[in-house]
Image: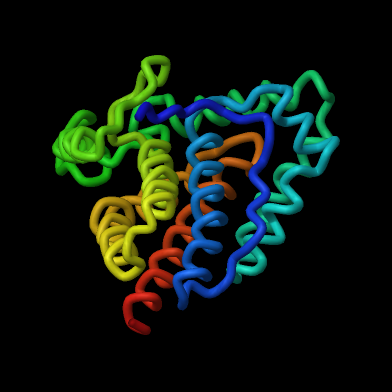
Amino acid sequence: MTITTASTTESPTPTTTAPMTTAQQWQEANLARSALYRWFADVFALELTAATVENWLAERTYDPIHEVFISLDLQSCSARVKDAIEALGKLPKSERALELAADFAQIFLLSGDESAPPYASYYLSSDKHLYGEPTQQMRQFLQSQQLSLHTEFREPDDHLSVYFMVMSLWIESSSAQNQEMISSADQQLSFLDNAFMSWLPKFNARCQQIKVQTDFYPALAALAEQFVLADSQALAAVIAEA
């Protein structure tokens, strides 16, 4: 299976965030979990297109996702993202996507000392060099799961979007195959704690320090960290209740 990481013009509309205590509730919650992980993967992968930005503003397609984040007790973080999106509407239409593209470049594409590189290697390697051990570990993990990156996604395997997409596909696969709930929860929790949360807070902290024109990406990074933390806690609760 190929991992595609390209910005979408539509926001997901997960329909349930029920407690994950029974097999049925686990399956229902996984629909929301997979959709949210995929959404994060998309918005961190590439600059947002003008069509995506206008869709968010005109159709208010972030609103249903905001409601889901509220149900996860992430209202303040999500409201910050929502406010950042609405603030774009105050800019001339021709400048909205350009401002976001400039911020994307400022935060993610410049040299490490001036940005917040979206790569695990930067935060987990003592020399902050890219293509470090986390890259090799993710590459091996992808191979073990018979996953590969889309050829048009020209980024190292330890890019932030890959972690989010791996979780989305993993959740989909475990649900489709009706894998045992506790085993799946334990494996996913281990991945989040050891492979993701080991560097995501450091990434978010750097995002808050970068001076940009809009608050969208700093707000998104803060929401991403809190979402992964909340999901980790939910998985831990599933295991504890078994």
Quarter assignment of residue 185:
bottom left
Looking at the image, residue 103 sits to the left or right of residue 55; the answer is left
The spot of residue 114 in percent (x, y) is 40, 32
Residue found 39% across the figure and 39% down from its top: 160
* Residue 151 visible here: yes
Residue found 44% across the figure and 27% down from its top: 4
Say if 18 sits above or below 152 in the image: below
Q: How many marks?
A: 0
Residue found 55% across the figure and 36% down from its top: 43
Looking at the image, residue 200 sits to the left or right of residue 15; the answer is left
Looking at the image, residue 98 sits to the left or right of residue 168; the answer is right
**In this view of the protein, which residue sits in the foreground, 138 or 144?**
144
Say if 218 sits above or below 105 in the image: below
Say if 224 sits above or below 110 in the image: below
**In this view of the protein, which residue sits in the foreground, 99 or 160?**
160
The spot of residue 230 in percent (x, y) is 47, 67
Q: Look at the image and tell me in which quarter the C terminus lies.
A: bottom left
The spot of residue 66 in percent (x, y) is 69, 56
